[in-house]
Image (cartoon, rainbow, N blue to C red):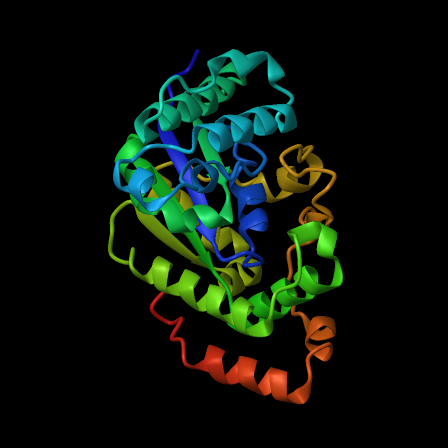
C-alpha cells in the first residue's frame, strides 16, 4: 500500500463553501475524502478538568467513530476503536482509520472536512503528524443569512432555532480563529468569491501549497464522480456538484426584516476580509 504523504483538514465557518472546496480537492486522483466526522468536537466535549488533563470524552469519541464508520460503509473497522482515555490515544485511533481507508483505496493523501474543527486546530496540530489546513472564508452576509435560514426553517437539519445575533457571533468568531493562523506555513486561505470566479487559478495556487501537481480534469471529475462523502440526510449540500458559480442568498435575505438586515450589514462591514 502507498504511504500517506499529506493529511489535510478543510475548516471554516458553516455555509462558507467548505463542501464545494472538499469536492474540488477530493477530485484529485491522489486524494481520498470522507463524510464529516465531528471527531475533535465530540472527543473534547468534556469538563474543564478533563480538558486540562487532555482526557477524552471516551463515550462520545467512540460513538462518533462508530457512527462515522457506518457512514463510510466501513463497519468492519469497528474493532479499531480507541484504547485508552487520553486525547493522544483517541486521535491515534482516528488517524489510523483515516490512513488505512485512504491506503486501501490506493490513495496517498486524505482530506477531512468538518467546519467546526476550526475550533480545535491546537489539538490537531499537537496530536496529528504534520497536518495541513485549508481555510475557506466567505462574505459574512451570505454566510449568516444562510445559517440563519437553515437553522430556523428546518429545525431537523441543524438541531434547533438560532438567533441572528448567534449566527453573526459565530461567523465573527470563525473569522478571528482563521485570522489567528495567518502567516503559518501549514495554513492556506481560500476566498470563496475568488474560488467560484476563477476556480482553476485558485486551485493551482492551492495545489502548489500542497506540493501536489494540479490535474486539469479536476473540474470535470468533480461532476462525474460519485460524492459518497455527502450523506442523504445532508440535503443542504445537494447543489455541490452543480456548475460552479457565485451564489448569493437573495431569497434568504428577504426573510430578514429591514432592521435585521441593517444590523447584519453593519456588523459584517466591520470585519476586514482583505487580509485573507
Q: Residue 46 falls in which quadrant of the image?
A: top left
- Nearest to the observer: residue 66 or residue 210: 66
Residue 212 pos. (x, y %)? 39, 36
Question: Quarter of the image containing the C terminus?
Answer: bottom left
Residue 170 pos. (x, y %)? 48, 64
Residue 111 pos. (x, y %)? 47, 35
- Nearest to the observer: residue 216 or residue 274: 274
Relative to residue 182, is residue 172 drawn left or right? right
Residue 171 pos. (x, y %)? 48, 65
Depicted 170 relative to depicted 5: above or below: below
Depicted 138 relative to depicted 57: above or below: below
Query: How many numbered marks have been drawn onto this rendered protein structure?
Result: 0
The residue that appears at 25% across and 47% down in the rendered structure is 185
Depicted 170 relative to depicted 272: above or below: above
Question: Quarter of the image containing the N terminus?
Answer: top left
Q: Is residue 32 visible?
A: no
Relative to residue 43, is residue 140 drawn left or right? right
The residue that appears at 67% across and 70% down in the rendered structure is 249
Depicted 70 relative to depicted 148: above or below: above
Q: Is residue 161 visible?
A: yes
Amino acid at each position: 500500500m502507498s504511504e500517506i504523504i499529506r493529511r489535510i483538514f478543510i475548516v471554516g465557518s458553516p455555509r462558507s463553501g467548505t463542501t464545494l472546496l472538499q469536492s474540488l480537492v477530493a477530485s484529485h486522483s491522489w486524494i481520498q475524502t470522507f463524510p464529516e466526522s465531528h471527531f475533535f468536537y465530540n472527543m473534547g466535549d468534556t469538563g474543564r478538568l478533563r480538558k486540562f488533563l487532555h482526557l477524552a470524552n471516551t463515550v462520545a469519541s467512540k460513538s462518533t467513530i462508530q457512527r462515522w464508520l457506518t457512514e463510510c460503509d466501513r463497519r468492519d473497522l469497528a474493532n479499531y476503536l480507541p484504547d485508552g482515555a487520553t486525547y493522544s490515544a483517541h486521535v491515534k485511533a482516528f488517524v489510523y482509520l483515516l490512513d488505512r481507508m485512504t491506503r486501501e483505496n490506493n490513495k496517498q493523501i486524505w482530506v477531512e472536512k468538518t467546519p467546526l474543527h476550526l475550533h480545535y486546530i491546537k489539538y490537531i496540530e499537537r496530536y496529528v503528524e504534520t497536518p495541513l489546513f485549508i481555510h475557506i472564508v466567505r462574505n459574512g452576509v451570505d454566510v449568516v443569512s444562510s445559517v440563519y435560514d437553515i437553522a430556523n426553517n428546518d429545525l431537523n437539519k441543524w438541531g434547533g432555532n438560532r438567533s441572528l445575533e448567534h449566527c453573526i457571533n459565530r461567523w465573527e468568531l470563525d473569522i478571528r480563529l482563521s485570522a489567528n493562523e495567518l502567516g503559518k506555513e501549514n495554513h492556506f486561505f481560500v476566498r470563496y468569491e475568488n474560488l467560484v470566479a476563477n476556480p482553476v487559478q485558485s486551485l493551482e495556487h492551492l495545489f502548489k501549497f500542497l506540493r501536489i501537481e494540479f490535474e486539469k480534469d479536476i473540474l470535470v471529475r468533480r461532476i462525474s464522480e460519485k460524492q459518497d462523502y455527502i450523506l442523504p440526510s445532508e440535503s443542504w449540500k445537494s447543489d455541490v456538484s452543480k456548475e460552479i458559480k457565485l451564489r448569493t442568498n437573495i431569497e434568504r435575505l428577504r426573510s430578514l426584516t429591514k432592521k435585521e438586515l441593517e444590523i447584519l450589514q453593519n456588523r459584517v462591514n466591520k470585519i476586514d476580509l482583505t487580509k485573507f
